[in-house]
Image (cartoon, rainbow, N blue to C red):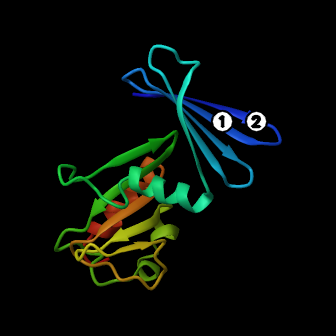
Amino acid sequence: MSNIRETALPGIGHKFEIKTRGGDKLVVIIHDDGRRELYHFYYDNPDDSISMISLDDNEARQVSAIIGGMAYKPKALESMEVALDDLVIEWFKVEPGSGGIGKNIGELGVRQKTGASIMAIIGPDHIKKINPGPDQVIEAGMTLIIAGERPHIQAFKNLILKKGT
């Protein structure tokens, strides 16, 4: 597991220093104006930066989606989970026969009943929808990217899978 250290930078934003399992060091500075700077450091000299890149807010969110697997999920991963302290982000595939199929998000009461949120949907046709609204209908074969604490995620799965939902 990687080691992440967060530091507030008053008047600037926040700094995140990530040390990977492989020993690499990456520093991400998120400026209050939305700009992000990424610095990669030499493995054997963690004080000497190899490279730096600056991203605006939109670019950073696009890169985040790519890295987080929202743009492309490797086929080898049936389900994926990312944990950020108590927050869990999970990819959940709706299997045929699930009770939530044919119902919309609002009708199911996803957030009210489970505490989880659907961040994005990848349809069986690979069309992606970020932040789907309450009118979005759940279909078999969809992959739902959901966020919440572990009990919320489990309650969400129970709601979607339950017959007669």
Q: Nearer the viewer, residue 146 or 21?
A: 21
- Image disc number at residue 97: none
Position of residue 10 relative to residue 97, above or below, is above
122 vs 25, left or right, is left
Label 1, label 2: how many angstroms apart (C-alpha)? 7 Å
Q: Which residue: 33% across, 61% down?
A: 157
Which amino acid type is shown beneath numbered disc 2? Leu
Q: Nearer the viewer, residue 120 or 52?
A: 52
Which amino acid type is shown beneath numbered disc 1? Lys
**Residue 12 x %, y %:** 77, 42
Disc 2 designates what residue? 9
Quadrant location of residue 8?
Answer: top right
Which quadrant: the N terminus? top left
Crowding around mark 1 (Cα neighbors within 10 Å: few <14, some 14 to 19, many 20+) is: some
Disc 1 designates what residue? 15
Position of residue 53 relative to residue 94, above or below, is above
Outermost residue, front direction? 50
**Residue 165 x %, y %:** 32, 77
Labels 1 & 2 near each other (Cβ < 8 A):
yes
